[in-house]
Amino acid sequence: MIVVMDIEDTEACYRVVKSRDRRFDGVFYTGVTTTGIYCRPSCPALTPHRKNVTFHRTAAAAQAAGFRACKRCLPDATPGSPEWDVAADVAGRAMRLIGDGVVEREGVGGLARRIGYTERHLHRVLSAELGAGPLALARARRAQTARTLIETTAMSFADIAFASGFASIRQFNDTVREVYGATPTELRGNGRRGGPVGQLDLRIAVRPPFAANHLLQFLRQRAVVGVETAGDGWYARTLDLPHGHGRMRLTLPAEAAREDHLRCLLEVHDLRDVGAAVERSRRLLDADCDPTAVDAALGADPFLGPLVAARPGLRVPGHVDGAEVAVRAVVGQQVSVAGAARVLARICERFGEPVPSSEEYDGLTHLFPRPEVLAEVDPAELPMPRARGRALNALCAAVAAGDLPLDRSADRVDVRGRLLALPGIGPWTAGYVSMRALGDPDVFLPTDAGVRHALARHGQAGPRQAETLATTWRPWRSYALMHLWTSLGDAPRPAPTTKEN
């Protein structure tokens, strides 16, 4: 099941608040009319009387209703609702784009064009679904980014206002006071810390448990030299952001399984890219996942149960750039993971944009090549079979022309159909792109070699039987797929025994 809450069912919402159930943090928010404060459902403060509580789908809706954020539970810092990725409806797609800073860069009109709606209709949909329009949702995002930078960096307030997307210092000051009931100076207090402007040390909220070591293993095995690097308990990579390059380093230690935050070091060339860099880091981590709901559903399956018990909180690695995922998927067709990484490293060294050297990010030398660059490359110059090179050209040309949106703005079914219409793109590639680039939690790849080997090791049959078996794993088949891949290092299960009559 997925943790979903109908806020019209106020009695059920209040029961969640009384139980302080952390699974619902980010799914809805509570406003207390007697204090003018809104909280996450698990706030440790005394439970208010039922008559004094209102419920809101988003932090923006609570703010629009006149509530300010609780200083104890920091409700705006919770992971986002996992429902957005499962439903992948207009509201969910809009929230992902707002988180990436599209409203700040392109305005509400740009957001509406990406979704395929008029501004008026998009406002109606978001107001009905989330309790706030696109401007209010973007304002809440700016406020949360500003608070994070105030409390975790030594940046000046002017730089923070600029980095958060505010139009002026006055707007920044007014919004912070209204949302948090404190001035920027009061929020910073005596805890001012951090490095030079553009270098940030942040914490990314996640729902525990979090199988950080398995996520790190997945990323490390596929790391492309020059673009990515990894070590014991950490992963780093370059970022191609809307206004310039950036670099990111995530701390992913094995002991982080019960933590509700992960450390993220960011370096951005342009302060306007801070919000986008944070959002893309969250996508990579699958930070909005509700592991309790996923593990409960898959753990009840007789076959998957032991795998889930061995790896609670396993995530589906997302990505920082949808076009990059698609290129990696095409290059990885019919070759090993290590072989694909070597080919990609050669492509990046030749066609990727170099970035300045940095002692803190040693080994990160290039950005991943942009689709418009690879679309113009002669397939004969690519270190892969000619047919696959042509498929890569066609894919990148479609992305560069805007015909193949891989930024979570379009309907997944539509994107999958467009992928399959391209030469050289089959169901495996389209499914892999949907899982990692579009955040689809319900992808299964029955013909994948790793899946076949994992099923065989555990006494299951071939692809056709696998598809039948996987129907009971909906809507979390992407997570089931990760359990199968991760289990390849496990000892085979003993064959089932039968008694003779």
Image (cartoon, rainbow, N blue to C red):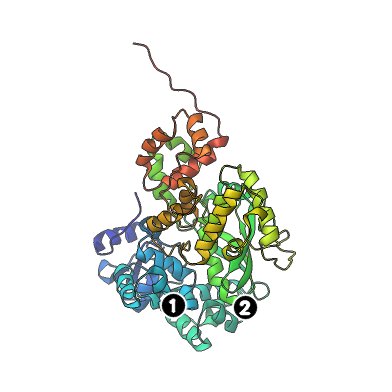
Lateral position of residue 224 relative to residue 496, left or right: right
**Amino acid on which the number 2 mark rests in the picture:** Met
Q: How many residues crowd around disc 1 within 10 Å: few (fewer than 14), some, or many (20 or more)?
A: many
- Looking at the rendered structure, the kind of residue marked 1 is Arg
Question: What is the x, y in percent for residue 144?
Answer: 48, 73
Q: Is residue 312 visible?
A: no
- Please tell me how many numbered marks the rendered image carries: 2
Identify the element where label 1 is drawn: helix
Question: Label 2 to label 1, Cα distance in Å?
Answer: 20 Å
Query: Residue farthest to the bottom?
Result: 170
Going 55% across and 34% down the picture, which residue do you hit? 490
Secondary element type, mark 2: loop
The residue at 43%/82% (across/down) is: 178
Residue matched to label 2:
155
Q: Give residue 26's position: percent from left, percent from top.
A: 40, 63
Position of residue 98 measured from the top left corner of the image (x, y, whole percent): 44, 71
**Who's the residue at 52% across and 37% down the image?**
449
Q: Position of residue 290 (x, y in %)?
A: 42, 53
Q: Relative to the observer, which residue lies in front, 100 or 431?
A: 431
Q: Is residue 405 visible?
A: yes
Residue at image position (57%, 63%) is 371
Which of discs 2 and 1 lies nearer the camera? The answer is 1
Residue designated by label 1: 139
Mark found first going from the N terminus, 2 or 1 = 1
